[in-house]
Every structure is written in structure tokens, then in C-alpha cells.
Image (cartoon, grey):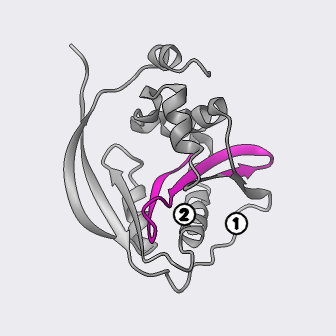
């Protein structure tokens, strides 16, 4: 019998750019870089390392072709946070439904949690998402995500507008390698 994880998904939105958005980098050695067309293996590495403790599985189930169609799309933007030259986290924005923008993924690798980098990373994502024509920014989080995710989104100006229940079938590392030939 397959293990099933049950979660409550909270959908959040904001309709204007927050007034006080400047959050200085908490460490001197932070750099946020836009990755125009990330190699699939690099994206899969980021996604796995950031999401492995939170049952992130949707992108792991995609073929290379399916994943490339999403992350290399002209309306998708991916930014990677580096600390002392090492990747520490990332976020992904989807501008396909502009002027509504979706913050698809945002997270840190486990060893970088607790250093105020999440606050900084989210502020950067919000700032980039609010281009001149943006009228709505949305994000979703679930009860399997980091327990500070929902409160952080709310502190940064997002308000919940819906909730839903979902079931997730986890993937173990052996399945990840089998499903993703680019690793």
C-alpha cells in the first residue's frame, strides 16, 4: 500500500506592492542571480534540495521534456540565492497570466534555514514580481511546508483567499533517480 500524505493548501494573494519592501541581505556574502535557462539537472537539484523535507514531488514526476517546457518558457523566471558562492535557495515566478503573477516555488536548502534568508528571498521575489503592469501576486503553501512559511507570507502582505485539501504520494530518492534521467 502506498503512503499518502494529507495536507491543507492555503491560497494567498496581494493586490498591491507593499510599501516597505526593502529587506537588506542578512549576510554580506549573498547574491541573487536570475537563471535564464537553467540546465535541467541544476533545476532538479535545487528543487530536490529545497523541497525534499516538504514532499515537493510534482516536478520530480515530469520528464525532461515536460520540465524544460515549463522552466524554459519565456514567461517563467527563476532566481537562485547564493551564499558564499554556494546555492542556498531559489524562487520561481510565472508571468503567463500577467497582470496576475504566481510565485510558484520559493524555498531554502535545509542548512540555510534560520538565518533570515527566507525573509530576504521572499522580499526579492515580491519586488521582482511587481512589475509596472502587475495587479495581483499569488502564492500557495500547505501544511507540509515549513511551519514558518504561512506566517511569513502573511507578514509580507499576502492574505489568504481560499483553502483546499490535497493528498500527496511521496517519492523516495530511488524513484527520483529512475524518473529523472537528467540527474
Work out whether residue 100 or residue 149 is closer to the camera in this orientation and state it: 100
Label 2 packing within 10 angstroms: few (<14), some (14-19), many (20+): many
In the rendered structure, which disc, 1 or 2, sits on the residue that comes first in sequence? Answer: 1
In depth, the one of 180 and 147 nearer the eye is 180
Look at the image and give the residue range highlighted in magenta.
80-108
- Front-most of 76 and 91? 76
Seen in the picture, residue 24 relative to 97 is either above or below; the reply is: below
Q: Residue 122 in the image: state x and y as whole percent.
A: 54, 63
Label 2, secondary structure: give it: helix
Residue position for label 2: 122
The residue that label 1 is drawn on is 25
Q: Which residue is drawn at 62% across and 32% down?
A: 40
Could you say where residue 91 lies in the image, as x and y percent from the top left?
56, 53
For residue 159, which numbered disc appears in the image? none
Magenta stretch holds residue 82:
yes
Badge 1 marks a residue whose secondary structure is loop
The crowd level at tag 1 (other Cα within 10 Å; few <14, some 14-19, many 20+) is some
* Residue 53 is inside the magenta segment: no
Quarter of the figure with the C terminus: top right
Location of residue 111 by image quarter = top right
Task: Please state if 22 lies on the left or on the right of 106 as rendered.
Answer: right
Majority secondary structure in the magenta region: strand
Lateral position of residue 116 relative to residue 3, left or right: right
Question: Where's the N terminus, which quadrant?
Answer: top left
Which of the 4 quarters of the picture holds residue 137? bottom left
Measured as percent of width and height from the top left, residue 94 is found at 49, 56
Amino acid at each position: 500500500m502506498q503512503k499518502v500524505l494529507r495536507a491543507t493548501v492555503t491560497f494567498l494573494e496581494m493586490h498591491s506592492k507593499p510599501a516597505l519592501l526593502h529587506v537588506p541581505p542578512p549576510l554580506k556574502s549573498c547574491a541573487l542571480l536570475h537563471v535564464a535557462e537553467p540546465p535541467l539537472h541544476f533545476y532538479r537539484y535545487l528543487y530536490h534540495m529545497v523541497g525534499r523535507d516538504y514532499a515537493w514531488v510534482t516536478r520530480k514526476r515530469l520528464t525532461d521534456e515536460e520540465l524544460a517546457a515549463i522552466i524554459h518558457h519565456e514567461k517563467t523566471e527563476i532566481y537562485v540565492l547564493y551564499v558564499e558562492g554556494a546555492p542556498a535557495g531559489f524562487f520561481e515566478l510565472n508571468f503567463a497570466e500577467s497582470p496576475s503573477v504566481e510565485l510558484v516555488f520559493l524555498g531554502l536548502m535545509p542548512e540555510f534555514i534560520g538565518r533570515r534568508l527566507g525573509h530576504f528571498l521572499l522580499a526579492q521575489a515580491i519586488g521582482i514580481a511587481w512589475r509596472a503592469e502587475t495587479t495581483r501576486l499569488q502564492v500557495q503553501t500547505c501544511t507540509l511546508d515549513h511551519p514558518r512559511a504561512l506566517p511569513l507570507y502573511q507578514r509580507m502582505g499576502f492574505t489568504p483567499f481560499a483553502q483546499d485539501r490535497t493528498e500527496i504520494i511521496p517519492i523516495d530518492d530511488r524513484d527520483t533517480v529512475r524518473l529523472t534521467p537528467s540527474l
